Image (cartoon, grey):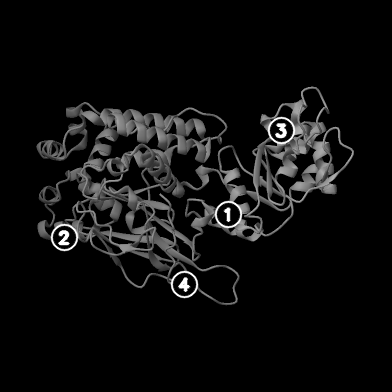
Amino acid sequence: MERTLDPWSHGTATGASSIPASSAMLLVLFHADLRRVGDVHVLGSAAVDGPAQIAIGRDLPAFVRGSGHRAPLGDPCISRQQLSIRYLASPARFEVIGVPDSRRPLSLWTMDGSPHPAPLAAAPPDSILAIGDRLLLWLGVLPDEPGDDDLGIVGVSAGCRQLRRRIRALADASATLLIRGETGTGKELVARALHRVGPRARSPFVAVNCAAIAEPLIESELFGHRRGAFSGASQASDGLFRAAGDGTLLLDEIGELSATAQAKLLRTLQERTVRAVGDVHEHVVEARILAATHRALEAEVAAGRFRADLLARIEAPSITLAPLRERRVDIPLLFVHYLARAAEASGGLARVFCAATATPPPLPMTSMLQLLGHSWPRNVRELEKHAIAAELGFRTDGRWPAPSAGGGGGDGDGDAAAARTSRQSAAAGRSRSRPTAEALARLLDEHDHVARRVADQLGVSRTTLDKWMRELAVRRPADIGDDELQAALVAHGEDLARAAGTLRISVRGLKLRLRERRLKLQ
């Protein structure tokens, strides 16, 4: 599923400032029709307050799809007018107001898939608005710049867009370039993009994993050898430097080279010539050299494992890739991209990517929240493997597996994220025995909407009950807007029991909501 995520067709601001203008926007992170993930609606400039509340619902407004086509959300399970929203610049926030009697409750989430403590009326940028269990909308601010889908890099985050700019700026250069990033962040993908959009695109691209070459063979593999130069050399070889011609040579995992290989590589980079093993002649190197590593080479230099002069030769210019945990907004887009690729290969594309009318959605919204909450220690490579496994699991038994809590090499919060994912997976397993929305609503009525009593009746925790209510779109006190609260108070005066009954919440929930919103009895 190749996408052209370019919603900024309205143009960019011009002027003397070198800082690009930015826009506030809504980005679809989850939809019953997974093809809609990545669609965008621009609210307006992030420099000024939005002029008015914009209504969001089933039939409006138009979201820009990957091909440039504009279409409303089109989910028949949400109201025609579900909410209104506007962006306020100072301080930066989104004002979200639910429409009374709309079909789905609203809730706010953080980018790691946890409930957000901020009120809907002051939702901060980089938060997620959930509409029942049908939609996740990212509330964010991004530069007014067109995307570069032809680079093959999926994502809309600020870091992803900065990476595209950096690739464009350095593609035409001939200098050696170092690509830094954790394992699985896509260093070879960036190297191929640099080659493809640069002047060497019609020439060879050669990639070699330096860590995969046995020490005795490194010199021969890189620089070539003459026939009979050593035992087993029955045929001559040009080596990878010469095989790349006037194209591009990627030396992946350069930090794994031995001290001897580093010394010979340094000479080649300085002199721009190579000498094959057993040869007396030197050959000019015409290829552009790219190097990549997941190691902190400065620390390797300090430890005596990497040459300081070689680092000085390759470190400028450089590109550093952000780990996936630092650009979580890209996770749903990448997951759907790889899911579509796997589904198309297996012939199950139509089943996974169904229409918006699917009830329930083939992929539960809770599964997407799990993906956002995972730490992804092996980054995009791990996400791709999970998408392939998820497509296989769904195709074979209709289940979506949770991301694995294992795996090393990530950041310091990996254990906490793994524990959170484990808890989410356990909760998801229990949710298979949850009641229907109608049964849960009936239980709440029977117990005067006192959540503790209902949880005890079902034999679950309050947290699990709250989760079920969110998933089933059963109203909670937090889902009730100020206007609806005020209307109930006006209608029933100081009779909180009747007001609570009208709102279908407990009296305690009503009091807490009044205190939270600082509303007073009329």
Provide residue 316's location: percent of width, then percent of height: 74, 52
Residue located at (16% from left, 40% from top): 437
Which residue is labeled 1 in the image? 163
Residue located at (50% from left, 48% from top): 327
- CA–CA distance in space, label 4 to label 1: 21 Å
Q: Nearer the viewer, residue 305 or 326?
A: 305
323 lies left or right of 346: right
User: Nearer the N terminus, badge 4 or badge 1?
Assistant: 4
Q: Nearer the viewer, residue 471 or 269?
A: 269
Which residue is labeled 3 in the image? 256
Q: Are marks 4 and 1 in contact (CB under 8 Å)?
A: no
Which residue is labeled 2 in the image? 487
Residue 11: image tag: 4
Mark 1 or mark 2, whichever is nearer to me: 1
Mark 4 or mark 2, whichever is nearer to me: 4
Please, what is the three-letter code of the amino acid marked with disc 1?
Answer: Leu
Q: Are marks 2 and 3 in contact (CB under 8 Å)?
A: no
- Estimate how packed mark 3 is, as few (under 14), some (14 to 19) or many (20 or more) residues with alpha carbons within 10 Å: some
Provide residue 425's location: percent of width, then percent of height: 35, 30
Quick one: which residue is furthest to the top in this view? 231
Q: Are marks 1 and 2 in contact (CB under 8 Å)?
A: no
Label 4's element?
loop
User: Nearer the N terminus, badge 4 or badge 3?
Assistant: 4
Provide residue 391's location: percent of width, then percent of height: 36, 36
Please, what is the three-letter code of the amino acid marked with disc 3?
Answer: Glu
- CA–CA distance in space, label 2 to label 3: 69 Å
Q: Nearer the viewer, residue 149 or 404?
A: 149
Provide residue 478's location: percent of width, then percent of height: 26, 48
Quadrant housing the C terminus:
bottom left
